[in-house]
Structure formats: C-alpha cells, structure tokens
Amino acid sequence: MTASPHTADDAAGPADPALAPPARPDDPGPRWLSASEQETWRAVWALMLQLPGPLDAQLQRDSGLSLFGYMVLSSLSMAPEHTLRMSELARLANGSLSRLSNVAKRLEERGWLRREPDPHDGRSTVARLTDSGWELVQSAAPGHVEAVRHLVIDPLSDAQREALTSAARAVIRGLEECPGADDPDSACTEVTETPC
C-alpha cells in the first residue's frame, strides 16, 4: 500500500479528520504518495517487473544464458585482463555476492569463467573470463543489444531517454548512499507499518 487507505486522492491522510488517529509531535505518520507520485511508482514497478523477462528470454533462446549470467560475463569482458574481484563483479552485475557465487559456479562448470585466489590479496577471489567465455559474449552481444534497442531505446525520444537516464541515476545514487539497502535488517529498509 502506498496511498492513504482512506482516500486515493488525499496524500495527507483521511478526508475526515475524525478517522485519523491522534497525531503525535514525534510521529508524523506515513508519508502517503500523492496521485502523481503513485503514477510514477506504478510505472517504475511495472518496468522492474516486465523488462527483465523478455531480455532474459532472448538470451536464453539465442545463447543459453540468463540475463544475470550475461551481465556477469559482459562485465568481465570489459574489465582489464578480463578479470575482476568477485565483490566488484557482484556490484557491476547488480547482484548479491551469494547469488553471484551460485551463478559463477554454473558458468565455471560450463568453462566460461574461472575463479582463483586474488594474487594481490589471498583473502579475496577473482573471476577471470576464459577464451570460450569471451567468444560467448561476442556471439551473444548483438542479439542482446538489438533486444535492448527494441524494448528500451527505440520507443523513447532523445529527450525521454535523457530524462530516464537522469532519473535512474538519481535513484541509483540514493541506493548507493545506503549500501545495506538489500539487507532486511538495514535502516534503509525500515518501514512504518507491517508489510502485507
């Protein structure tokens, strides 16, 4: 729930003050979304739900890769010596270290990457793209780029694309300023009411 349960149009709370609990100076209550803010959130939510599916389906169909697996290999392909620490690779691929470890194991079993101790820090592990992994990225990239262009780039005007880029970066900055945002115990994920 993002809008007031009493009315969808009144972001400040219920239309009838008698329906609202007594306000406390130290507890202003939920910051309900206005109608226009709800439209923004619904659009973002729909995008998050709907976009990964067709991108993943195209990669699975044409290259036998998941979208996350492709992002892992693609990130390695653009790194110096095709090598990255696992922690940095998780950040670039936008996944948790545990998820990356599971995916990296499958990619390693298929001969597309290799994990080894970091020669500069024995406590860390690096992932290195193999020759066959490099060839796979090269063969998968054209189809993926065409899907991205068809689904994301082509429907937008230049002004819309620039606005989307700016808006996405603003949200990402907020997430990066709270590095524990994917941790349910983090202050970044504290809520003011019990989730459904």
Image (spheres, rainbow, N blue to C red):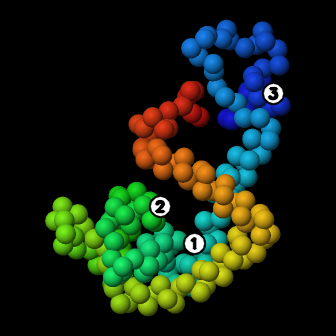
Compute the Cα span from label 3 to label 2. Answer: 36 Å
Q: Toward which corner of the image does residue 152 lie, by quadrant?
A: bottom right
At 64% from the left and 71% from the top, the residue drawn is: 54
For label 1, the residue is 56
At 22% from the left and 74% from the top, the residue drawn is: 116
At 54% from the left and 51% from the top, the residue drawn is: 173
Identity, as a three-letter code, of the amino acid under mark 3:
Asp
Identity, as a three-letter code, of the amino acid under mark 1:
Asp
For label 2, the residue is 94
Q: Dot 3, crowdedness within 10 Å: few (<14), some or many (≥20)?
A: some
Q: Is the C-beta separation of discs 3 and 1 under 8 Å?
A: no
At which x and y percent is residue 82?
Answer: 36, 80
Q: Tell me, yes or no, if residue 73 can be seen here.
A: no
At which x and y percent is residue 129?
Answer: 35, 81
Secondary element at tag 1:
helix
**First of labels 3, 1 by sequence position:** 3
Compute the Cα span from label 3 to label 1. Answer: 39 Å
For label 3, the residue is 10
At which x and y percent is residue 120?
Answer: 19, 69
Q: Toward which corner of the image does residue 112 lie, by quadrant?
A: bottom left
**First of labels 2, 1 by sequence position:** 1
